[in-house]
Amino acid sequence: MSEGGPGRVPAGEPESDPEHRAGRGRVAALDLGSRRIGVAFSDSRRSLASPWGTIERTGDPARDRRGVVEAVREVEAVTVIVGLPLNLAGQVGPAARAALDEVAALREALEPLGVTVEAVDERLTTVEAQRNLRAAGRSAKTSRSVIDAAAAMVLLQAWLDRST
């Protein structure tokens, strides 16, 4: 079982540096879906999350990572948080293991550029994003193309709110 509560990464994973979290500069969030990667970003004061869009998966992980690097550069992020799909008990299952592998690959690509990458518990962010889209009058069918970016935005806003 993982240590801590929602928003905390499993034992053995690096914790966020509180000084870096309280820093300045934009933060990007990634919701790693099987078909799309949802991307959101913050303002430079780290108070408001906005959706950026999605990156369609190509079947080529290296190409997908290049797309992420391009998005991170475009929004001028200094930190990237990646949703970690822990199970409801807070444990690392197959989906979270796959996400942690992607986090490691993204660190290799982004840290040389001065961008910090961290994994963050994303439990129920997609559910909350779907609820928000429904409340805004979007049907499940019309929400498919934006749900991943909306989930990344929910994840990022929660992270920003905890950081202040």
Image (tube, rainbow, N blue to C red):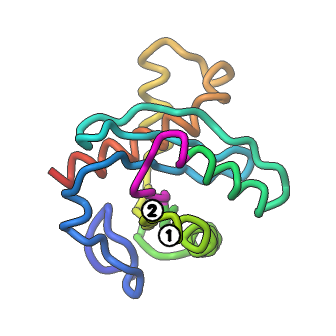
Q: Which residue is mark 1?
A: 111
Range of the magenta residues? 72-83
Q: Residue at x 42, y 18 (%)?
A: 135
- Residue type at mark 1? Glu
Q: Is residue 105 magenta?
A: no
The answer to whether marks 2 and 1 mark residues whose Cβ atoms lie closer than 8 Å is: yes
Residue 40 at what x, y percent from top left?
A: 47, 40
Residue 161 at what x, y percent from top left?
A: 21, 46
Looking at the image, residue 39 lies above or below residue 120: above
Q: Find residue 115 and name its label.
A: 2
Element assignment for label 1 = helix
Element assignment for label 2 = loop
- Residue type at mark 2? Val
Q: Is residue 57 left or right of residue 119?
A: right
> Between residues 113 and 41, which one lies in front from this camera angle?
113
Instruction: Compute the Cα span from label 2 to label 1.
Output: 5 Å
